[in-house]
Amino acid sequence: MPELTEGEVREMLPHLQRFSLWLTRDPHSAEDLVQSCLEKALAQSKSLKNAPSLRAWLFSILYRQFIDGQRRKRRYQRILSLFTGEDTEVVSSAEEMMINDDMLAAFAQLPTEQRALLILVSVEGLSYKEVAQTLDIPLGTVMSRLSRARKQLQQWGEGSASPGVLRRLK
């Protein structure tokens, strides 16, 4: 079997969906998992000739995709809990994972000073006064930078502003 055919995919689809639903216990997540499994299988169909069984090969891909997704969810949960200060449930949908990825990417695009302020205040729990002393900047600067950082993240999260270049003021 050199390549995966459409007939083979159609034949295996109900089995993959059933296994995926059993793993995820959520119909939407199960559909996403099957889709990502099939995408990976089609991209790697040349390695199918080394597999003893099509069924075992596809189940193996699906299961590895599931395990990778669970690890990714736990990692994102830990990162997000640092910013929110509360334990959040494991993200169950691909859409929520995409939103979280976008917010983390937006956070990475903030200027270093704003990222440092957000981490010190939101993650480390320092007061504004302690942050001002730590960074050796005035208290008013801490509050204004923090306000701008939060506002920018909110705008990016709502899609009302695209990350842009900040002007340097002298």
Image (cartoon, rainbow, N blue to C red):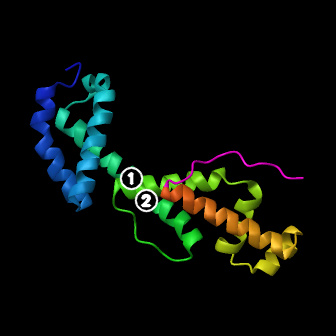
Residue 135 at x, y percent in the picture? 85, 68
Residue positioned 68% across, 54% down in the render: 110
Residue positioned 89% across, 69% down in the render: 136
Position of residue 24 in the picture relative to residue 128 (left or right): left
In front here: 115 or 41?
115
What secondary structure is the stretch in magenta mostly built from? loop
Other residues around mark 1 within 10 Å, as few (<14) / some (14–19) / many (≥20): some
Residue 122 at x, y percent in the picture? 65, 73
Three-letter amino acid code at disc 2?
Lys
Range of residues picked out in magenta = 159-170
Residue positioned 40% across, 66% down in the render: 90
Residue 114 at x, y percent in the picture? 73, 61
On whether residue 35 falls in the magenta region, the answer is: no
Callouts 1 and 2 close, C-beta under 8 Å: yes
- Residue 14 appears in the picture as rendered: yes
Q: Which quadrant of the structure image shows residue 131?
A: bottom right
Residue 73: numbered disc: 2
In the picture of the structure, the residue carrying the numbered disc 1 is: 69
Residue positioned 29% across, 33% down in the render: 41
Give the answer, above or below, for where 142 lies relative to 11.
Answer: below
